[in-house]
């Protein structure tokens, strides 16, 4: 009878089981009785912004003179800022309008084309920031940081609540 | 008298001010009376893992057959997993041992060489995952996902609490 069972368990299946038991992704599944899908999506979105801000911070500090200019650090931070900025498109699925405290206004989903336009502008600025940071040209980097910060602000002014709801 | 003041305000300074007013980094500074430095560092670390897991999840789901195999998605997710895995070194500064709920065991800092070794192993596996995913070879990708998941697990078993403290 046991021969009717799907066996032997292949190395691939074993590897997948190990993967699932070890992965952080699995953690989210194991907490299925915990956070809702909306909560998970909102947590993911907020994590993207935390990582983005955590890397924009140091290059903005250099640009404003609060930290000494370090071309290697500037290039590293700019690369990360652009990489994460390009992940933001996935941060706003329809299911994430509500379900956890969020500063993302419902206007984002009501006026998605405008939101997407501002996000694309941000990504153009972060692409330029990354390109510029690779050159090590301090004055140009400062301008690109300013343009990126302005692109952040343009979207926040329209689509971000001042306080968490 | 006013001529003794540092003026005119340069375009660079203006750009920096715009940057700071608009940036997410500034938000963290504005909340200086809010979260402590340790809380901010722990939040940043947890955000890295959230982003990592949010991208490993879809490729692990493909590898385990829970989602249909999509070579483009696999390559995208693998690139992100490797990119974020390389950011983890910055996730564990000494000031982040405690100060907010965290599953990171104090053993990480007491036994940093071992932790760093396991992190480097993870990064070797995610580098291989990224390389493999570019080829579109489904069987090889599944193996690389398994190896990455095992590297996650090796570190979690030693250095991650089962429950948040």
Image (spheres, coloured by chain):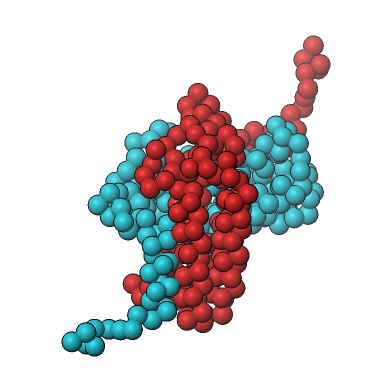
Chain colours: A red, B cyan
Left/right placement of residue B42 relative to residue A20 reads: left
Quarter of image, res B121: bottom right
Q: Residue at x 42, y 79 (%)?
A: B11
| Residue A141 in the image, given as x and y percentages of width and height | 50, 76
Image quadrant assignment for residue B162: top left
Quarter of the image where the C terminus of chain A is located:
top left
- A88 left or right of B76? left
- Quadrant (top left, top right, bottom left, bottom right) of the N terminus of chain A: top right
- How far across and down, in percent of the image, does residue B117 sit? 50, 55
Taking the spot 42% from the left edge, 51% from the top edge, the residue there is B44
In the image, residue B46 above or below residue B87: above
Q: Where is residue B125 in the image (x, y as percent from the top left)?
A: 62, 52
Name the outermost residue toward the top.
A1
> Quick check: can you spot residue A44?
no
Residue displayed at 46% across by 70% down: A146
Q: Residue at x 50, y 23 (%)?
A: A33
Q: Is residue B102 above or below residue B80?
A: above
Q: Can residue B85 be seen in this view?
A: yes
Number of marks drawn: 0
């Amino acid at each position: 009878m046991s021969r009717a069972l799907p066996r032997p368990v292949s190395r691939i299946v074993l590897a997948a089981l190990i993967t699932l038991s070890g992965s952080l992704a699995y953690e989210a599944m194991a907490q299925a009785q915990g956070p809702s899908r909306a909560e998970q999506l909102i947590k993911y979105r907020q994590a993207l912004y935390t990582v983005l801000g955590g890397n924009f911070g140091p290059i903005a500090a250099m640009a404003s003179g609060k930290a000494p200019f370090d071309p290697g650090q500037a290039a590293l931070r700019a690369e990360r800022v652009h990489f994460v900025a390009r992940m933001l498109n996935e941060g706003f699925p329809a299911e994430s309008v509500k379900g956890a405290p969020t500063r993302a206004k419902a206007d984002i989903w009501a006026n998605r084309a405008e939101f997407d336009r501002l996000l694309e502008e941000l990504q153009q600025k972060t692409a330029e920031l990354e390109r510029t940071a690779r050159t090590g040209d301090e004055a140009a980097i400062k301008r690109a940081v300013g343009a990126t910060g302005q692109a952040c602000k343009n979207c926040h002014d329209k689509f971000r609540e001042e306080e968490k709801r």
